[in-house]
Image (spheres, rainbow, N blue to C red):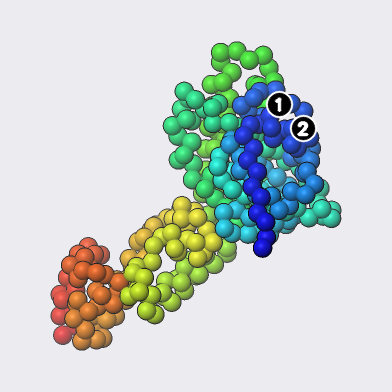
Amino acid sequence: MEQRQTQRIKTISEFHQLRGLPKPEHPLISIVDYASIKRPSGTDDVSWIFDFYQISVKRGIDGKMKYGQQEYEFDYDEGVMFFIAPNQVFKIQMDNHSTIKRSGWMLLIHPDFFWNTSLARTIKRYEFFDYSVNEALFLSEKEEKTLHGIIENIRQEYHSNIDRFSKQIIISHIETLLNYSERFYNRQFITREKANHQILERLEKLLADYFNNDDLISKGLPTVQYIAETLHVSPKYLSGLLKVLTGQSTQQHIHDKLIEKAKEKLSTTALTVSEIAYGLGFEYAQSFSKLFKSKTNQSPLEFRQSFN
């Protein structure tokens, strides 16, 4: 049986020490050159948990990353942005024989740095901290330069003499960094059209297969969590993608497929509304009828009668 080892890094100072870096100039925030990071030997099978945020842009990544229950291979020579929040479990296995040159930066921020600031309240709204590596942000050269400029402003501020304005200035830069990241993610939903449409195609097939077998009776309606896990994306990423591409949420897509199936049964079978409701995973026919009317402005019987 494979032995699983998980190591928690509680402080930024501890991260610096473990990665062979000089002591951080500030205990709660640090910018690290990705190329200067040393990987301790024998850590390929170690899962990591940080007690702080990590925002990074990396080039020259070659290996595997396990994030949650999913494992992904990556081979990126372009700029890729990653977000990891405190208490998330991940594991990285690098290809030590890779000839790709590593470059980029990491911004490490302990949650205590946000205390009594606007980000203490709003950091959770940035959904990309829930994303796994297959949902990484691929940056254009221009976007990468924009973010690099913000990082340099943060570096310059905490390298300077710290005064009563420094923290708020750094917080403002971090907010700007996150807001640009949000903009770039939204752009990615649109520009990475092929990959995104493949997700849509897989979603349609998944829902069609689910609604065409006995899963509805035995399991009920598919949940958003189930759909996202089956497609190997996070629920928030899937919802964001669908909103941009179709204007609808994942839940609305599930309901649309349900109504489509209900219309088929109402128009081509003699099953009662109760029987159709049960076959579609509803415990109560009233709940089915209420959803059907909210979607079609007709009751199930009114819809059936329109075919007679």
Please tell me how crowded label 2 is: few (under 14), some (14-19), or many (20+) other residues with Cα within 10 Å: some
Q: Quadrant of the N terminus?
A: bottom right
x and y percentages locating residue 290 in the rendered image: 20, 64
- Left or right: where does residue 25 sit relative to residue 113? right
Q: How many marks?
A: 2
Examine the rendered structure and indicate whether residue 185 appears above or below residue 105.
below
- Taking the image as drawn, is residue 244 in sight? no
Question: Which residue lies under the disc numbered 2?
Answer: 21
Which residue is more in the foreground, 260 or 273?
Answer: 273
Question: Which residue lies under the disc numbered 1?
Answer: 24
- Taking the image as drawn, is residue 234 in sight? yes
Please tell me how crowded label 1 is: few (under 14), some (14-19), or many (20+) other residues with Cα within 10 Å: some
Residue type indicated by callout 2: Leu
x and y percentages locating residue 169 in the rendered image: 56, 22
x and y percentages locating residue 107 in the rendered image: 64, 35
The kind of secondary structure element at disc 2 is loop
Which residue occupies 46% across, 27% down? 118
The kind of secondary structure element at disc 1 is loop
- The single residue placed furthest to the front in the displayed view is 1
Which residue occupies 47% across, 68% down? 203
Question: Residue 102: which numbered mark, if any?
Answer: none
Residues tagged 1 and 2 counted as in contact (Cβ below 8 A): yes
Which residue occupies 16% across, 85% down? 308
- Left or right: where does residue 189 sit relative to residue 297? right
Examine the rendered structure and indicate whether residue 188 appears above or below residue 33.
below
Which residue is more in the foreground, 119 or 87?
Answer: 87
- Left or right: where does residue 13 sit relative to residue 239? right
Q: In which quadrant of the rendered view does residue 31 lie?
A: top right
Which residue occupies 78% across, 43% down? 40
For the residues marked 1 and 2, what is the alpha-carbon distance in whole angstroms? 8 Å
Which residue is more in the foreground, 28 or 163?
Answer: 28
Residue type indicated by callout 1: Pro
